[in-house]
Image: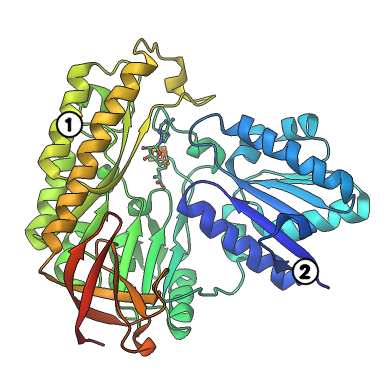
Amino acid sequence: MGTKLYIKTYGCQMNEYDSDKTVDILKEKKGVEVTNDIKEADIILLNTCSIRDKAEAKVYSELGRLNKLKEKKPNLKIGVGGCVATQEGKNIQKRAPYVDLIYGPQTLHRVSDLLDANKSKGIKAIDITFPIEEKFDSLPEPSSGGPSSYVAIMEGCSKYCSFCVVPYTRGDEVSRKPEQIFDEVARLAEQGVSEITFIGQNVNSYKMPYGDRILRLSDLIEIVSHIDGIDRIRYTTSHPLDMTDDLIEVYQFVPQLVSQLHLPVQSGSNKILEKMKRNYTVDVFLNAVDKIKSHRPDLRVSSDFIVGFPGETSKDFNDTMDLVNEIKFDSSFSFIYSKRPGTPASKLEDKTSMDEKKERLNILQSQLNKHHKDHSENMVGSIQRCLVTGLAKKRPDQLQARTECNRVVNFDLKNIGFIGKLVDINIDEALSYSLLGTLHNPRG
Ligand code: SAH
Ligand code: F3S
């Protein structure tokens, strides 16, 4: 029987991508098989996240549980990767000495070597450095798990928003070589992938030389739109400051680029944006959205919000609500500010009570939910171009597809040959988390 790997992933889409790559590397180098049953695992990896909450404490309590498994199975290898690993580093060795390997988001490609070092020398292998280019160079052959795939185009972040740990846990921003990106997209397209999502912490600050040109995100989008089989292009996450005119213009002439944009605004108050070191005003955000809408009137915008940032008054919060009502954001994320160790904002005085913050989050979330529901209901009766992603989760007689705004649409199964294809669907009904539709006419 082969070595069994159990990997638990917390946090953002970068972590999901990193976990997929870790699995691919360990399959290639160690012939591991992935298991969903933790009890039968020979290697357990936690790919951790430290963006909010008491992330460190949660990891230590999870490790405590894993130690019980290790007591029964001494050959079990336990590894901690991801952002908590970078942040805690050697502390993990001290507090959880049974952990065998500690690696960061930028050293996951060395996991196999770390396992070897641990085995042959019996050492606790630890590597939480930031060799980002080496990571990109040693990623395994891309493999698709369906018609839609992530493609990392950059790593890390150099924006240093005052509340955020990412620049410290993932390192400064590094863009990936264009050749590697084009190669990966082409290989995925050959495997039948028709939708790609460029991912990174801040994809719209992408910048890399290519021949005698400097390529930006707009160029990557334009170039991959010519790769055969690529019908849809998304990107996430982007920063309002980097919504440059070239990127806005690309909406005009690349139809594969979806009319959906995730653009985290965080707050609708200029005073709070300044304290957050976001380096833009609400007007800059509105202006970028307006300009894209001049090319794509049907653009849907989703966002991230933080409520209860230190110094946020009820007037500041009301400014956020005004912005929410003006843009009518689609599927968005909202969080109560969480003090992160080592960040500049952690030193700011914070007088707002937790009850008040929870109240603000409730008000914000119910309005965001209302807009989400309104958008879904407004789609009833329309024809939406959707990418067929597979069989419906609960009804094997139905297929599942996704709209440009990424809503799930279930429709009666006509032909599984539609999987991976774009089809037009009449939207008949809006449910809370999905839509129901009927095939209009097959495309592609
Ligand atoms: N560009 C990144 C943003 C990373 S964090 C990306 O890839 O998504 C995702 C979201 O978490 C941020 O947009 C912000 O809204 C939220 N967030 C980050 N740090 C936070 C903190 N200290 N407290 C609360 N929310 C936070
Ligand atoms: Fe974090 Fe701001 Fe970068 S939210 S990931 S420091 S853009």
Which residue position holds label 2? 30
Q: How many marks?
A: 2
The image position of residue 93, as x and y in percent, is: 78, 35
The image position of residue 121, as x and y in percent, is: 92, 51
In the foreground, 337 or 413: 413
Q: Is mark 1 within 8 Å of ligand 1?
A: no
With 265 as the anchor, is 186 left or right in this view?
right
What residue is rendered at 27% in x and 36% in y?
Answer: 365
Q: Amino acid at mark 2?
A: Lys
Element marked by disc 1: helix
Q: Residues within 10 Å of mark 1 (few under 14, many from 20)?
A: some
Q: Quadrant of the C terminus?
A: bottom left
Q: Residues within 10 Å of mark 2 (few under 14, many from 20)?
A: some
With 283 as the anchor, is 345 left or right in this view?
right
Query: Can the viewer see residue 178?
Result: no
Q: Amino acid at mark 1?
A: Met
Q: Earlier in the sequence, mark 2 or mark 1?
A: 2
**Ligand 2 found in image quarter:** top left
The image position of residue 295, as x and y in percent, is: 10, 62
* Comparing labels 2 and 1, the label whose residue is closer to the camera: 1
Element marked by disc 2: helix
* Quadrant of residue 128 within the rendered picture: top right
- Residue 352, compared with residue 108, is above or below; it is above
What residue is rendered at 69% in x and 58% in y?
Answer: 6
Q: Which mark is residue 391?
A: none
- Residue 324, compared with residue 218, is above or below; it is above
Q: How is the image coloured?
A: rainbow
In the foreground, 391 or 179: 391
What residue is rendered at 54% in x and 24% in y?
Answer: 341
Q: Which mark is residue 321?
A: 1
Q: Quadrant of the N terminus?
A: bottom right
The image position of residue 318, as x and y in percent, is: 17, 24
